[in-house]
Image (cartoon, rainbow, N blue to C red):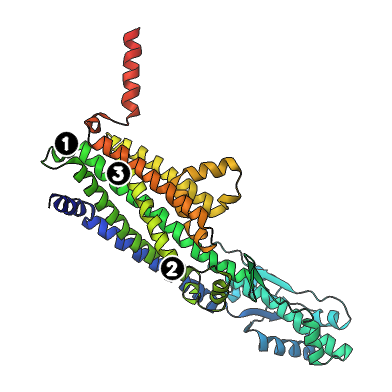
Amino acid sequence: MQFRNLLKKELRELFTLQVIMSMLTSVVLLVLMGQMFGGAVDSAEEQSGAANIAVVDTSNPEFMNQVMSVVEQNLKVSKYNVTSDDYASELKRLEIDNLVVIPEGFAESILNGEPGKIDFISTVKVGGLTSSLSTITSSASISVISHVIQTMVLSGNYGLTETQINTLWNNVVAVEYATFDGKIVNASAEEITGNVMMQMLIAPLVIFFLLFMASQMIMTAISTEKIDKTLETLLSAPVSRLTLLFAKLLAAIIAALANAAAMTVGMFFYMDGLSGGIMGELTGTAGDAMSQLGLSLGVMDYILFGVQLFFTIAIGLGISLILGALATDIKSVQSLLMTMMMVILVPFAACLIADVNAMSPLFKTIMYLIPFTHSYMAIPNLMTGQMALFWFGLIYQIIFFAVVMYFAVKMFTSDKLFTMSFDFSNRRQRSDVRRQSGK
């Protein structure tokens, strides 16, 4: 009964209106960002879907009309008329950002067997990723024009049939195979790798944000109780300190798991919008190929990952509980939180950029000593069947959690909880006083 009442008290203190609003805001923001990015890409593609082309060459109207008619069959074209070679002014007058100009003498050069020059004018835009889509569309039109003219030359000058020209253009057909762990499938390795990376990216992001929020939450809560002297009153109540400790820890874990669920939902929709809906399309060809290669996760894999996620959260909260109890004021809380952040951030960045297993023995050992590294590596290890590494990481985390809890219990069951502190400013002041008294 006492434990349940304490747990309810801790949950009420952790799940404040501000915390709940923060969780909901995070989910809504991630969903909106994903949808907004996807919508911005779609909108930019619609606006830049047509290539802007101006035909100035009038030396051979029949040739140019034939070229443009074929180009328009393969590409959406917006036609413009330019009145001068001051292209910067022309773009401003026409209110466009990109323009492909076929200048005088182009047809004559082609018909004489010489390269024909095309002017491509594009405005430099600094406004995000979508601002470059219109430039890419117009630039691609040059390749289409080149392909059309080459086809016309091959047909007119050399008498090649359409079948022969198609064979010439497609004389090399790449049949892609992807192999992994001795298995091989008829599929694109690039597409499979992209899908694998998309799935492997979400878990580390969720773990990172989860550890950050959970650590900040429990560290702030316990340090505030100590600074406000409410912790002393609570510990003097007729309830064992172990009961209080585990009530705080369990409440923090519940709060962290709630944050994890909210963050997972938000990150899923964010990544889905970012990738143009690819997260919902993994059951296609790439999904089947991943299953054949053994790169897909089963129910047991997700259960094992959930177990490791639990110990990850527990370790982070245990360390934060100890660090929060060491704080003496808000500045020391911030210093301790920054230290915790670095421990969380370093393995996250390392796993995101490189393969930890491919690092030098020294760096690999350092990374393996940080318990959170094994959490970031869990999905890749499960996906690639490296179960020895997964079990090593899980066992190491269990042992690390036991050590953390041992120190937490020792601290909470002794009066050192009220005397231990992390305050470098006071230490410096005491040191200065001792030096002055020594003089």
| Crowding near the residue tagged with mark 2, few <14, some 14–19, many ≥20 C-alpha atoms within 10 Å | many
Give above or below for 385 relative to 413: below
* Residue 232, numbered label: 1
Q: Residue at x 22, y 36 (%)?
A: 413
- Image position, residue 302 (x, y; %): 42, 64
- Quadrant location, the C terminus: top left
The mark that comes first in sequence, 3 or 2, is 2
Q: Residue at x 13, y 49 (%)?
A: 2
Q: Is residue 282 above or below residue 19?
A: below
Q: Which mark is residue 219?
A: 3
User: In the rendering, at what x and y percent does residue 55 appear?
Assistant: 72, 82
Mark 1 and mark 3 in contact? Answer it, CB < 8 Å: no
Q: Relative to residue 407, is residue 96 depicted above or below?
A: below
User: In front here: 30 or 245?
Assistant: 245
Q: Is residue 267 left or right of residue 81?
A: left
Q: Which residue is mark 2?
A: 34
Question: Of 300 and 120, which appears nearest the observer?
Answer: 300
Q: Which mark is residue 170?
A: none
Residue 292, image x and y in percent? 57, 73
Q: Is residue 387 left or right of residue 118?
A: left
For image coordinates 59% across by 73% down, the residue present is 134
Give the residue at x 50% y 76%: 281
For label 1, the crowd category at 10 Å Cα-Cα, with few meaning under 14, some 14 to 19 and many 20 or more, is: some
Counting residues from the N terminus, which is met first, the one under dot 1 or under dot 3? Answer: 3
- Residue 128 visible in rendering: no
Mark 1–mark 3 Cα distance, whole angstroms, equals 17 Å
Q: Secondary structure at mark 2?
A: helix
Q: Secondary structure at mark 1?
A: helix
Kindly indicate the quadrant of the structure image that contains residue 303.
bottom left
